[in-house]
Amino acid sequence: MKKIVFYLLIIALLLTGCSKKIEVIEDNNTSNNKEEKTNNNEEINQMKAIIHNKEYIINLENNTTVDALIKLLPLELNMNELNGNEKYVYLDDELPTNTYSPKKINTGDVMLFGNNCLVVFYKSFNTSYTYTKIGHINNLPDLGKDNILIKITN
């Protein structure tokens, strides 16, 4: 019986030593954003958008803009119509940007124009403007000529 207790004590000490080494390695190799997501044990790569009482999934990019937007959720936004192809709203908060020129906007693209204008595109077209990509909604229908209410949650 003493041998079993002795062996269990040795195993416990070895496991404790190993777990500390693993924690140090993880702490040295992870960024602050990854640590926050790991601590929550979840990485958000989708959000829900409710438009005209129908739920859509926004497949998210992996960037600091999305991280900042997630912190603002849930959102209920009155989005304005523009050009017969997009809905937009100016957010109260400015978000970090990583702009690029996509050359073509696709139906369902969710973008940030500037640092606080959230845009949902419901028709494809060519563009020379720059945006920060937030995500994409598959199978987004034509949202019509009126302003809309959109609810976004994680």
Image (cartoon, rainbow, N blue to C red):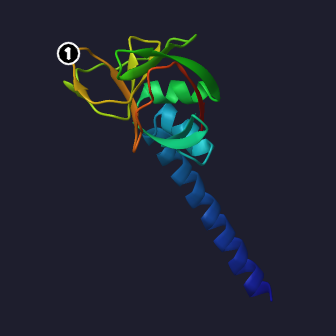
Residue under the point 63% across and 43% down? 40
User: Where 25 sits versus 153, above or below?
Assistant: below
The answer to whether one can see residue 95 in this image is: no
Q: Quadrant of residue 127?
A: top left
Q: Is residue 99 left or right of residue 11?
A: left
Residue under the point 61% across and 65% down? 15
- Residue flagged by tag 1: what amino acid is it? Ser
Q: Is residue 23 left or right of residue 13?
A: left
Q: In this orientation, which residue lies closer to the viewer: 18 or 82?
A: 82
Q: Farthest bottom residue?
A: 1
Q: In this orientation, which residue lies closer to the viewer: 49 or 2?
A: 49
Q: Position of residue 76 (x, y in %)?
A: 63, 24
Q: Is residue 8 left or right of residue 45?
A: right
Q: Farthest right residue?
A: 1
Q: In this orientation, which residue lies closer to the viewer: 37 or 145?
A: 145
Residue under the point 29% across and 33% down? 106
The answer to whether one can see residue 129 in this image is: yes
Callout 1: 10 Å neighbours few (<14), some, many (20+)?
few
Residue under the point 20% across and 15% down? 128
Q: Quadrant of residue 93?
A: top right
Q: In this orientation, which residue lies closer to the viewer: 28 or 35?
A: 35
Which SS class for mark 1? loop
Q: Which residue is mark 1?
A: 128
Q: Position of residue 114 (x, y in %)?
A: 38, 11
Q: Position of residue 81 (x, y in %)?
A: 45, 16
